[in-house]
Image: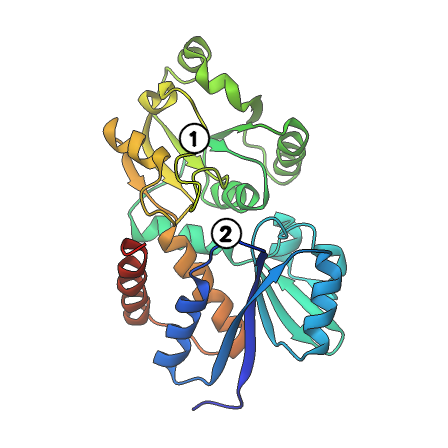
Amino acid sequence: MIGMKKICGICKKSGGYSISPLMQSIFSQEMGVDTEYREYNIDGDISVAIESMYKQGIYGLNITMPYKRSIMPYLSGLSNEARKIAAVNTLIRTKDGYYGDNTDKSGLIKALYNSDIELRDRHIILLGSGGAAYAAAYACVDEGVGSISIYSRNSETAEELARRLAATDSIPVSCNELNCLDDKTHVEEHFSQKKSIIIQATPVGMYPHISDRLLSRNYVHRMCDTAIDLIYNPLQTGFLQAAKEAGLICLSGLDMLIYQGAASWELWHGVSIGDELINIVRKKLIRELAGM
């Protein structure tokens, strides 16, 4: 075993599901590191919960929706990545408190590379404006997309994301209400020139609410050649099922989950995870999710 036992875990909304405990346990077992990974269900104030975990000596934490942004004021410091994206998904214990980082963006970029999906100069249709959408948007910027259209139910957060993107890059960014995508005329007027890539970055359709739908019509799928859903459970969401039926290239959120989880593990332990272990974890998680 390498070093002393560390206690790490995941902070998630009470009642929510996460496969991260299984994934992180496999990483530690295969790497020969003595780590216990726990689930922490948050019902109340996230600041109180984090203070309690720090007092308990918890070394590292993953943060899930809806806490990726609300937790930030209670941290002792932020990485440049977390500060830019305005969201954290990984906490590392320091002498002054927890330090926040974000591995979601790098996880998505690695997942795209692994699936040979090229973003450069492409038009992106981004669904959502929360923490996951922020990571996706900045991944798009880093990969040199041509333009981004944000569609969200929350116009305030969508406009804030657009302002942040405009402050860091010169690519064209527009905001629209999500229900515009159920308007055939709007879709045809805005996306008729060339095929787009659509990224679903909301929790709609996530287990156990797998029958929930973000869009009531599939007009926008006809204007795209690639669909990416950041949800990993189920592996094929209703959104991806509709995209598959429309003939699009489809990517679930599983690889993003694995790569961001591996990056978190590396931050906690200072040891790199290789491609062979990534493949082992992917196969085990697919089996687990298929059995649900």
Q: Is 278 situated above or below 269? A: above
Q: Is 167 situated above or below 97? A: above
Q: Residue furthest top?
A: 185
Q: Earlier in the sequence, mark 2 or mark 1?
A: 2
| Res 108 seen here | yes
Residue pointed to by mark 2? 105
Asked if the residues shown at circle 2 and circle 1 are in contact, with their CB atoms under 8 angstroms apart, the answer is: no
x and y percentages locating residue 25 in the rendered image: 41, 74
Identify the image quadrant of residue 1.
bottom left
Q: Residue at x 40, y 68 (%)?
A: 22
What's the coloring here?
A: rainbow
x and y percentages locating residue 212 in the rendered image: 43, 33
Identify the image quadrant of residue 73.
bottom right
Disc 2 residue type? Answer: Lys
Disc 1 residue type? Answer: Arg
In the shown orientation, is residue 195 left or right of residue 37? left
| Res 247 seen here | no
| Callout 2 crowding tier (Cα within 10 Å): few <14, some 14–19, many ≥20 | many
| Callout 1 crowding tier (Cα within 10 Å): few <14, some 14–19, many ≥20 | some
x and y percentages locating residue 21 in the rendered image: 45, 67
Q: Residue at x 26, y 26 (%)?
A: 246
Residue pointed to by mark 1? 213
For the C terminus, give its image quadrant: bottom left
**In the foreground, 257 or 17:** 17
Identify the image quadrant of residue 206.
top left
Q: Is 29 situated above or below 145? A: below
Secondary element at tag 1:
loop
